[in-house]
Image (tube, rainbow, N blue to C red):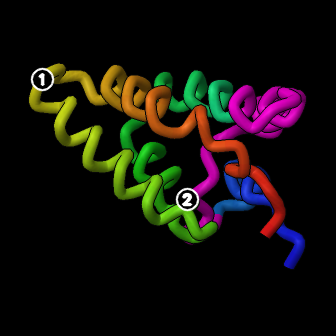
Amino acid sequence: MGVVMIKQLEKSDVPNPNDMGFLSHEQLQVVESKRTPAGQMNMVIDYLVEMEDIYFENFCTILEQNNFEGKAKLLREKAKDLEKIVGKFEYKQHACMCSNITNTDNMFVQI
């Protein structure tokens, strides 16, 4: 064990169909340099909004795998609601994650 959730966000250098990471090594270093979980999450969100939609789903799956099922479900629900209003997934993704995850103090703790 001792796996840190944040490490799962890093994209593997070796192609692997089970790899859901989406951050480059450099991006992950920037995320890890943030001192607070909220700061780290804000940085992840900043990267996610510039990426394809599949990475949002990968992020939700990673949350579920780390016992944040409720957060993942809430994000997906908010995304669906906002999709009806806004048409751009990237915008609604950013809006729902900012409003629902940045207040989570223990998002990147060891499991």
Instruction: Determine if the magenta segment contains residue 17.
Output: yes
Residue visible at 36% across and 26% down in the picture: 90
Do we see residue 44 in this rendering? yes
Instruction: Name above or below for residue 77 compared with residue 87.
Output: below
Q: CA distance from mark 1 to mark 2?
A: 25 Å
Q: Residues within 10 Å of mark 2 (few under 14, many from 20)?
A: many
Amino acid type indicated by mark 2: Leu
Label 1: which secondary element:
helix
Task: Give the class, few, some or many, for how many residues have Cα within 10 Å of label 1's Cα (few <14, many ≥20).
Answer: few
Q: Position of residue 1 (x, y in %)?
A: 85, 79
Residue 13 is at least partly visible in this image: no
| Quadrant in the rendering for residue 33 | top right
Residue drawn at (28%, 40%), measured in percent from left and top? 78
| Residue annotated with mark 1 | 85
**From the viewer's perspective, is residue 24 above or below residue 59?**
above
Badge 2 element: helix
The C terminus: image quadrant: bottom right
Tell whether 54 sits left or right of 102. left
Left or right: residue 10 versus residue 55 is: right
Q: Which residues, given as a range, are shown in magenta?
A: 16-40
Q: Are marks 1 and 2 in contact (CB under 8 Å)?
A: no
Determine if the magenta segment contains residue 77: no
Where's residue 6, x and y in %? 75, 50
Q: Farthest residue to the left: give it.
A: 84
The residue where tag 2 is placed is 63
Q: In the rendered structure, which amino acid carries the disc numbered 1?
A: Ile
Residue at point 87%, 29% (across, down): 35
Q: Residue at x 12, y 23 (%)?
A: 85
Mark 1 and mark 2 lie on one chain; the one further toward the N terminus is 2
Q: Nearer the viewer, residue 84 or 102?
A: 102
Q: What is the x, y in percent for residue 61?
A: 48, 62
